[in-house]
Image: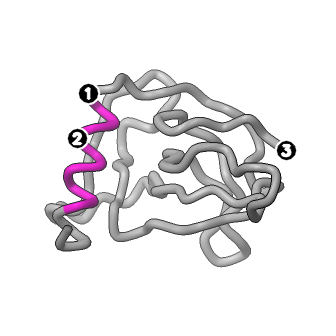
Amino acid sequence: MPNAKPGEVWQVDLGMAAKSRPCLVLTPPPGANELAVFTVVAHPTAIRGNRWKMAMRKHFLSPEGAFDVQRMATVESVRLERKLGELTAAELDSVLDRLAERLGI
């Protein structure tokens, strides 16, 4: 199982329609008695300019893309293909703040 951590960006197989794309890991690795899943936010390259998309300039991300907090998913650990890089604590906090706003919490 991948040893992904919150704030890391992994290439993730999101299924046939969604393709494989960079995703921000939101949850810690599962415990021994938990399902082997991670919750992630996708980084598509199509930016349509709404408040739920967050562009971040990182050398491992496409400059045309943005994290889309409307595209949160929980995926099996086997779908995490490889680590691309990681966000700073401040960058992760900004995504989590926007996600909390989206969820109304």
**Do the CB atoms of the residues marked 1 and 2 lie less than 8 Å apart?**
yes
The answer to whether 66 appears left or right of 20 in the picture is left
Q: Which residue does the image show at 33% across and 26% down from the upper left?
A: 89
Q: Which residue does the image show at 21% across and 55% down from the upper left?
A: 98
The kind of residue on which mark 2 rests is Ser
The kind of residue on which mark 3 rests is Met
Query: How packed is label 1: few (under 14 Cα within 10 Å), some, or many (20 or more)?
Result: few
Q: Residue furthest bottom?
A: 17
Query: Dot 1 corresponds to which residue?
Result: 90
Magenta segment includes 93? yes
Name the image colouring: one colour
Quadrant where the C terminus lies? bottom left
Occupied quadrant, residue 63: top left
The kind of residue on which mark 1 rests is Ala
Query: Dot 2 corresponds to which residue?
Result: 94
Instruction: Measure the C-alpha gap from mark 3 to mark 2.
Output: 28 Å
